[in-house]
Structures are given as structure tokens and as C-alpha cells.
Amino acid sequence: MSTTQELHELPAQYNPGQTERAIYERWIEAGIFSADEKRSRRNGGDREPFVIIMPPPNVTAALHMGHGLNNAVQDVIVRWRRMIGDETLWQPGTDHAGIATQNIIEKELAREGKTKFDLGREAFVERTEAFVEETGGEILRQLRAIGCSADWNRTAYTLSPELSAAVREAFVQLHERGLIYRGHRVIHWCPRCMTALSDEEAQHGEEMGNLYHIAYPIVGAKDNAALTVATTRPETMLGDVALAVHPNDERYNKLIGKSVVLPIANIQIPIVADEYVDPEFGTGVVKITPAHDPNDFEVGLRHRLPMPVIMAPNGTMENGVDAADRVPPQLIGIDRFEARERIIRSLEKSKLLVKVVPHQHAVRHCYRCDTVVEPRLSDQWFVKMQPLAKPALEAVRDGTIRILPERWEAVYINWLENIRDWNISRQLWWGHRIPVWYCDKCDRQIVSRTDVAACDKCGGSVRQDEDVLDTWFSSWLFPISTLGWPDKSSAALAAFYPTDDLITAPEILFFWVSRMIMAGYAFMDAAPFHTVYLHGTVRDTNHVKMSKSLGNGIDPLDVVEKYGADALRYTVIAGMGMGADLVLDHRDLERSFAPGRNFATKLWNIGRFLLVNVGTTPVRSVDELTDSELTLTDNWILARLNATIVEADMALGTARPDKGKWRPEERFSGLRLSEYAEAARRFVWDDVADWYLETTKGRIGTPGNDSEVARAVLTHVFDYALRILHPIMPFITETLWQRLPSPLAANRCEFLAIAPWPIPHPASSDERDAVSRFDLVRQAVSAVRKIRSDYAIPPGKSMDVVIQSRLNAPLFSEHAPLVGRLSRSTVNVGGEPAGAGAAHSVLSDGSEVIVPLGGLVDLTKECGKLQTELKQLEGQLASLSKRLQNEGFTSRAPAAVVEAERKKEEEWTKRREQLSEKVKALCGG
RNA sequence: GGGCGAGUAGCUCAGUUGGUUAGAGCGCCUGCCUUACACGCAGGAUGUCGGGGGUUCGAGUCCCUCCUCGCCCACCA
């Protein structure tokens, strides 16, 4: 294939859209994302398993930047481990998302003027299934567009038969172990979703409300005496069954045992004493509404009070269980907030409203629809959490599991230490039906792994519990259920459990992460993973979380289309420090993703340079190159490559703990992806493109052995740079790598995606020297460039340069042509500069770069510059000397530091002498 | 109310255990279409490292305090 043909395949402008899809197809066809149980060391294979469970997105979700970020991070890690040679499994899946999905269908129905009750349960579930079938899982297809290398053959779904079986097994097992029970208590209730919520699903929000002071007339008291209570929710007063005061409150304790009249309902309720009451708050009198407040419920239990329910599930007023006719007819069917207004007006009229005080308090909202949650007495299924939390707590404390960044460990521990029982029943239709049956005849309760047709005791007909399980009750099993649990003989479970890293956002630390850890111990007796990596949130320039509904979102697919998946990935990975938020401007995608796009273009152009100049003929292997063949620049770039590999490895860190527990020194290091990205970028751009590639131009253009050496080294260096970058930018690196004129090797990999990750080698002495020696050459080039820029000498104008060096004259002599070419000048080493007046620049080894300015520039300017430089140097030298004269410093600072400072002082003194001489020479004293 | 985090260049952020003249990207200024790249090249400017105090020979880094933001948790009606 001719060079021109190749060039047609690598157009001047990188066009990701053309290449990405095709490459992805080839990866899929080659099956390189598929994990094989047999290759896992745990199943007798020869590879270390490395497994990441993908946080399953909601089955109806559309890809947003949060997913983009989350999955980019996972893919970087998975691809890295794949290149290392691990048997990697990235387990994908979706979550049926009970409330969220049901809400979507309900909204659809509402547009048709219907409710779910018009359809009935069965039809509603069928319709939802059809919807999921049709539109669900789209997000997983979208993830392919950003390059995710998950094992799609294993795609799981929380409502699939397999995972549903796992859910039942888990429920039954926990029930058998006495860890699941039915409880009658006040729970959080969403009147819009009409279901119970867990504590985590009812989220706090600070709000301004009112504290209403209401008078309850005391029965049998003179002068219309009354007790005043303060409440934020007056509508619940219809459910009051008592007033409570603190037993030691001298204002009220003589009233204990007496009664008051509950206004509006006009019934008598007792005054009780309870230590729960804080005499300092409000009036020191609390109305007790056991059915609509969790604290009051406790008080109610203690005092054996009735528990009337005065609100319907949809949040309107009604006379529910035990309420008799507490709610007057004119309030029945009225929404709770409207009822609040009406009650207040009515109390005002009857002069029982004492005062209204503005009051800031926390109100809980439904995490799915943001409706204010109503505490409500009901029967629900609960998981007893404390026994489950114990090993989960211990695992993080003892370093079996680490949480990155470190600060989240404290949050995790604090939550688990104060954990409360988990309400897992939901009054929804979309989800796993609770596997409990009730006998109509003998009232027996049957908890079963399989469907129950009749009572096993009396043969009576049975009906299944109407409720479904909390969505998280299926997702907390994800690490085990996706691998085959409860089938403990599952090859996948044996090969891939425990998994390795879990990458997600801190928002679901309690919802999901901690519960998975508990499930791991409860059902497998082992932690599900050893590393939890919590990344930040994607925000707009005002630091507001990006979301579709706020209109400040970025569609990752837009970015992919415009700039490519690699640009998206690099921008996101390089731009996000450990645990830090990522700020992007949704109004300026070009600017937001410039880092990634520019870098991708840079890579592309290095690739084009290679194809044009290095050509397509295979190069020699660098291993065959002898020390005498390698030039200074070759050794330098090889040393830099080596250092870059080390930097990348350090930033990525240790992949798994040694012997099951993290060592303190490794525990909170690693997975610093932005540092890894930066190291790679620095190498490719600052070292390879800006310097090494430039130095090869002359060499490659001159046929001969040195041309072959340069071709080989440049190809090798770029090959390895592409390997290092592949996890971050898989598409462009694969594209370029496929075309490299790499040395012919019998077992060369077909894909970069499975090519070996670079291993650093011990640096040769030539390489070590090369770093400092080439640095001097670079300094010389930069010095000339700066002089040209400082004196505004046009790039086209030829310049004669003299380098005077006592220590490194041979180095500069040898590289004079190179320095000349890179700085567009003619360089001579040694000798005197011709003509009067010259610009000087002193290098770190004391060598001097001199550019005679006669005929090029006004000399008085140069004088001024030199004098300024001298002044600066003298200032710096003075402070340095002062430090060295300080006895405290010389005696207490480490010897090496003092030594270094002394050396510096010497150098600077020398430089000062040289400078002042030049000033004298040029400016006439 | 409790806990945690952040405040470093115009913007977004790096700055490992205290140690050369505090860095990167984007933006900005100057000059360049130098045959891989103007999504580029070369050169450059910009920081009382939130304020104050302390420890130290030495503090962006450690301690105290104050200010400003943000997050998490929480049954004070």
C-alpha cells in the first residue's frame, strides 16, 4: 500500500464519527470484552480476575453526563486491567426502578385521561413490561457510543426471572433468619406515589414554615383556661389523642391526668406526662398524634393511647382506622394543605389560635417526585439491619474494603453505626411481589420461594401480599445475583466473586453501596468488592447539578457526535480530581471539551507525521538497537517514556489488596485518574511532539542507519504512548496503533485493546545522563528562541549564535546543528561573537548563549534588559545568602538541603559576576 | 443541631510526608499559515495560596481563630 493511499485513510482532520463505530464493531466481533470463567485463576485458569459491577441505570433512563462520567471512569479502569492481562469482567445491567418507572407509565395514562386503577394491576404491569421491552435498555446501547467495554452478553435486569429468583431467595433466607419482619408503625408515606418509602427515600429539605400556637381548653377549668400547643402541622390535630408535658415541668405537672377539649373535633383527650417533651421548645406542651408522627407513635405506645388515622393515602382528610368522626364533614376529601388553611381560619374564628410564628424546619420530600412526605401508621415489611451492618462496618474499619476518597469512610461508618430498620415494602404494582401468602381460612402466613396455591395447613385459598419490594432490595444483590447466586455452584460466581472496584456517586452510598456490602456478607459471607470509588457530580458553571429538567444538561451523545468519544472521555478523566466535582459549560461545548478534542487532534497529527515520514515499512525493534546507535535524543525520550510509565503506574496504584486487606500505605493512594491522564498528556505533547519528533525530522530525512534508528525509536515511543493512553482514549489510539509500522513480530496483538501494558525497565546510565544532557540542549534552544522573541527578530531572519561552555563544550558542539535547526539560527560553539553588543543567556550549567545583535536590533534596549536581569539576580542572591547565614537553617535543616542551597549560591554568584561583566562590556560600565 | 469538605492565576482545578524562583488546562497578550497539527507553533503576562494569629531555620502544606461557600446526617413538636 502506498503512502498516499494511507494518507487518504488518515485525513488532515480527525473525524471520530467515521472511525469509532467501526472499531467498536471489531472489538465486539473479536469478543475481547467477553469474560471467560475458565480463565479466572479461581477456576483453575491462569489469569487474575478483575471485576467491576456497573451501577445499573434505570431501565428507562437516557444517557446523561452523570452516566458518561461514571462509565468513563469504569471503562478506564477495566481497560487498564485488561491490558495488564487480568481476566476482566465488566458486568452491565439495568434496574427496573420501581417508583420511577411506574411514575412514567402513570403519567402516560394521565395524558390519556386514565389512572392505573382503570387498567387494573395485571394490565398495568403488562403495559409497563411492554414499555420497558420497547424503550428499555436504550442507555446500555448509548454506553457503547462512548466506548464502554462491558461484557454485553451478560447484561442483567433486576426484574429478569434469574434475578427475581435471587430476590425471593434473599427475602426467604432473611425471613428464616429472623431478619425480616412485619411491623406496624409510622413510616414515611408519599401521598402522590401512594406508597411507603424508606428513610433514605424521604429526603430532608430545610423550609420556612409556621409554628402555630393553638389553645386546647382545659376541661372543668375556670376562666376558660387552656393549654397552648405549638405545631407545624395543625391539620394533624384531628388525630390528637392526648397532650403531653414533661413530668418535671412545674408549669404543667399539676394538670397531668386532667383532660382538654380537642378543638374542631370536639372530643376530650387526656394530658399525659412524657420525658420526650422538651420544656424549652415551643410552649412545652406537645399534641400527641400517634398515627401521623413517629415520636407521637412511641408516646402513644407508652401510654396505650388509641391511634386514629385521619388522612387518606392520597393525602386528603378522612376518618380512617379508629378515627370515628373526628374529621368534620366539611373537611373530608380536602387536601391536607388546604385543610391546614381551613383549620387555622376556623381556630382563628373561635379565638383558639394564639399566634403564628415563622419557623424554619426540615421537611421530608419524596426522592422521586418531591412531594412532601406524610408520616403514616401502617403495616410494612422491614429488614432488621443491625446484625447485617456489623460485618459491613468491620470490613471498612479493618481495611478489607476501602472507600475513596478517604473522607467518605467516616460518613459510611457513621451511617452504619446509627442504622435503622429498612422498610422494604412498597404499595406499588411495578416490582417484585413480596413472596408472602395469607390463608383466607386460617389466617396463616406463608413465606415461600415458590408460588403458593393453597394453604399448606388447612388447604384454604391463599392470596399473595399486594405489595412489592423496594427497588433497592433487588439492586443490593446485584454483585451476587448477576453472577448466578443463589446457585452456589455457578461458574461465574466462583470465578468472579468477590469483585474488585465499585465506582459510583456518593448519592447512593447508603441506598446501594452499603447495602451491597451487607448483602455480600449476609449471603456470600464475603465483601462484594475491596474498593469503593466515589466520584464527583457533573455541574454547570454556576455549580448547579446538571439535569435534563433544569435544562442545564449536556447530552454525551452530542459531544460524541461533535468531538468524538475520546474527547469526551479525556476531558472528563483529566478534568476531575479524586472525588471532586466536574464543572462543564452546557452553553459552550466547544470550550468545555477543548482539552479532549485538542489532544485527540494532536495524537492524530503525530500519527500522520509517522505515516508520512516514517512510512509503513516495518521498523527495527528497539531491543535490537545498540547503545552506540542510540543518540542523545533517543536515550532522552526512552528515559522519559520510562518515567511516564512509572508515573502512570503510580497514579493508578495497586489494583487489589494484598492478602485481602489494604496496607495503610496503599489504602488511599491509587485510582488518581487525572494524574495518570496528565502524565500521559505531558509525555505525548510536551516531550514527544514538541521535542523528540522535531529532532527526528533531520535524521529520518537522511537515508542511512541513523534514519532507521530514529524511525524505530519514534515508532516505539508512540506505540507505547498509545498503550498508556488507550484506556482513556480507546478509539483514536486503536485506530493509530493499527497503522503503526511496528517491528514484525510473530505474536503481535491484533488489537491495542488487548496489547500488553508497558512495563518500565531499569534505566541505563546512558538514559539517565540523557535527561540532564538533553535538558541543556533544550535550554540552549529556548534561550535563542527567547532572544529572538525579546528583540522581535523575525522568524525568517537568520541569526548567528555562539555558545560558550566550559563544562559541556563537546555536548554543544555535537548538537550545534540540532540547536540551530530548532531555533532557526546558525550555531557555533566556542570563539568570540562577532561585532559589538550581544544578547546573553546563561544556562544552568554556566554555559552561555550569545547572540550578536549588531545590525539586528537597537543595543540600548539590550543594555536595559541586562541591567534588569542583574538587578533581579542580585535580589534573589541576597535572600539566598541571608538564609545561608542564618545559623538555625544551617544547623537544623537536612544537610542535603543546605548543600543544595550552597551550591546554588555559588552558581548564582558566578552568574552575577558574568552578568555584571557583560553589562560593563555592552553598556560601557 | 451534629459531622465533613472546599476557598491557590480571569475560569476550572493540581500541589504527595513542611524544603529550589507555587504548577496545568482553558482564556488573555505578542509574533508566526516553519512541508504532522492555526483544534497549531514560539514567546509572554497574571497569584499579599480566603483574613488574622501561632509553631518552625523555613508554611500553600502543621496548629488556633474568624469569614465565605458547598455537601452529608438529624424524630425537637
Image (tube, coloured by chain):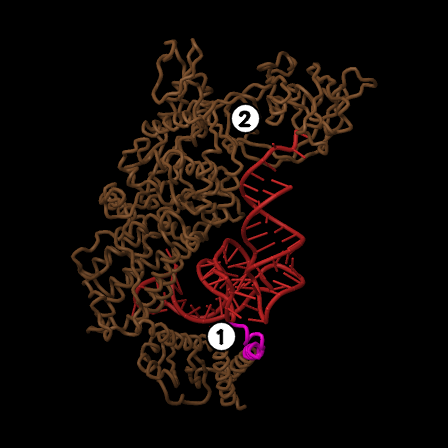
In this view, the residue farthest toward the right is A223
In magenta stretch: residue A677: no
Chain letter of mark 2 equals: A
Q: Which residues are magenta?
A: A876-898
Classify residue A126 by image quadrant: top left
Q: Which residue occupies 50% across, 24% down?
A: A195
In magenta stretch: residue A877: yes
- Where is residue A51 shown, x and y percent of the image? 33, 44
Do discs 2 and 1 belong to a common subunit? Answer: yes
Q: Colour of chain B?
A: red
Which amino acid type is marked by label 1? Ala
- Up/down of A393 relative to A99, above or below: below
- Where is residue A746 shown, x and y percent of the image? 16, 57
User: Mark 2 highlights which residue?
Assistant: A187
- Up/down of A466 relative to B2, above or below: above
Instruction: Tell which circle, 2 or 1, labels the residue nearer the N-terminal end.
Output: 2
- Up/down of A398 relative to A883, above or below: above
Magenta segment, principal secondary structure? helix
**Which mark identifies residue A803?**
none
Left or right of A750 in this view: A211: right
For the colour brown, the matching chain is A
Circle 2 — which element? strand
Chain letter of mark 1 equals: A
Quadrant occupied by the N terminus of chain A: bottom left
- Where is residue A577 shown, x and y percent of the image? 46, 53
Which amino acid type is marked by label 2? Ile
User: Mark 1 highlights which residue?
Assistant: A895
Left or right of A616 in this view: A687: right
Looking at the image, which is closer to me, A227 or A136? A227
- Where is residue A915 shown, x and y percent of the image? 50, 84
Looking at the image, which is closer to me, A98 or A330? A98
- Up/down of A19 relative to A169, above or below: below
